[in-house]
Amino acid sequence: MSSKFVVKDIRILSSWGYNLSSNTDCTICRHSLNSNSLYYQDKGLDSYVVQGTCGHSFHYECIKPWVEKNKHCPICSAEWNYADRKLPQSKKKHT
Ligand SMILES: [Zn+2]
Ligand SMILES: [Zn+2]
C-alpha cells in the first residue's frame, strides 16, 4: 500500500493577512514595480512606487496623470486615495 500524496505548488493567497490582490506590475506602463517606469527609464530617472488605499500600487509618475483625470484606481475602480507609505498593520475594528 503506497499512497504517495505529495502536495506541491500550494499557493496561499491570503498568507499575509491582506485580502487585497496587490499587483506587482504597474498596469499603466506595464513595467514591474521593482523597476523604473517606461517614462523614467527613458529619461534615466528613478521611479518610486505609491500605493492607493485600495491596495494597488503604481509608479508615481504613471498614476499621477491618471488620477488627475479619473480619480479611480485603474485596476479595481475604487476611488483613488494615496495610502500611507507604510502598510496598515492593525486596523481597529473591535473596540
Ligand atoms: Zn508605471
Ligand atoms: Zn485598486
Image (cartoon, rainbow, N blue to C red):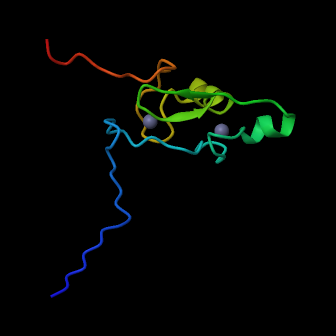
Query: Can you say whether 1 is above or below 19 in the image?
Result: below
Q: Residue at x 48, y 31 (%)?
A: 72
Please identify the residue farthest to the right as the structure is shown: 43
- Ligand 2, by image quadrant, is top left
Which residue is found at the position 78% from the left and 34% from the top?
Answer: 40
> Looking at the image, which residue sits at the far top?
95
Q: Residue at x 35, y 38 (%)?
A: 16
Residue 80 % position (x, y) = 47, 26
Quarter in which the C terminus is drawn: top left
Q: Nearer the viewer, residue 78 or 94?
A: 94
The correct choice, above or below, for 40 with respect to 11 in the image is above
Image quarter in which the N terminus is found: bottom left
Camera-nearest residue between 29 and 72:
29
In which image quadrant can residue 54 be found? top left
Q: How many marks?
A: 0
Q: Residue at x 19, y 18 (%)?
A: 93
Q: Position of residue 15 (x, y in %)?
A: 33, 43
Residue 10 lies left or right of residue 48; in this view the side is left
* Image x and y of residue 43, in percent: 86, 34
**Residue 26, quarter of picture:** top right
Q: Nearer the viewer, residue 17 or 44?
A: 17
Q: Residue furthest bottom?
A: 1
Task: Please indicate whether residue 38 sits to the left or right of residue 80 in the image.
Answer: right
In the displayed structure, does residue 69 sit left or right of residue 39?
left
Q: Is residue 94 left or right of residue 21?
A: left
Residue 81 in picture, x, y percent from top left? 47, 21
